Image (spheres, rainbow, N blue to C red):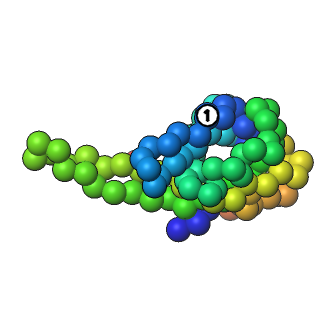
């Protein structure tokens, strides 16, 4: 599954060499969400770690990522891990931090009631 989201680079972590054959780099995106701001951590791996090199904290970016999840059994108990695996980062256009692909509504949503008389419930 591939998704896009736009936000501001809030924090960028150093690259980590996890094993001889595996490296990762994490970053946090600040995403406006109505009255609340979301802080979402993404992960880059292997050759994708360098994608962050051209950006700095505070830059507005669009991130394309895959949503992955895996079960892990420890001591007979199953835990689930979710990962946001980024694979493309690009400078964002000026959409005021709106998630990429978010619908733009130009008129209010239609009402379910056609008149005030329809709003009178029998109970």
Q: Is residue 98 visible?
A: no
Query: Between residues 68 and 105, which one lies in front from this camera angle?
Result: 68
Q: Position of residue 59 (x, y in %)?
A: 81, 38
Alpha-carbon neighbours of circle 1 within 10 Å: few (<14), some, or many (≥20)? Answer: few
* Image side of residue 39 versus residue 53, left or right: left
Residue reaching furthest to the bottom = 1
Q: Position of residue 12 (x, y in %)?
A: 66, 35
Residue reaching furthest to the front = 20
Residue reaching furthest to the left = 76
Q: Is residue 21 visible?
A: yes
Q: Position of residue 3 (x, y in %)?
A: 61, 62
- Helix, strand or loop at label 1? It is loop
The residue at the point 56 percent across, 55 percent down is 46
* Image side of residue 86 versus residue 81, left or right: right
Identify whether 95 is placed above or below 68: above
- Count of numbered marks: 1
Image quadrant where residue 29 sits: top right
The residue at the point 55 percent across, 61 percent down is 66
Circle 1 residue: 13
Q: Position of residue 99 (x, y in %)?
A: 71, 52
The residue at the point 72 percent across, 37 percent down is 9
* Image side of residue 79 versus residue 89, left or right: left
Image quadrant where residue 35 sits: top right
The residue at the point 11 percent across, 42 percent down is 75
């Amino acid at each position: 599954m591939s998704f896009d989201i736009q936000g501001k680079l809030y924090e960028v972590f150093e690259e980590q060499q996890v094993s001889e054959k595996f490296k990762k780099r994490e970053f946090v995106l600040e995403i406006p969400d109505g009255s609340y701001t979301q802080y979402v951590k993404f992960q880059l791996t292997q050759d994708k770690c360098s994608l962050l090199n051209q950006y700095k904290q505070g830059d507005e970016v669009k991130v394309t990522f895959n949503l992955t999840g895996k079960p892990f059994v420890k001591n007979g108990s199953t835990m689930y891990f979710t990962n946001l695996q980024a694979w493309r980062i690009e400078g964002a256009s000026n959409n005021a931090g709106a998630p990429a692909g978010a619908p733009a509504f130009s008129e209010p949503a239609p009402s379910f009631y056609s008149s005030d008389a329809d709003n009178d419930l029998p109970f």
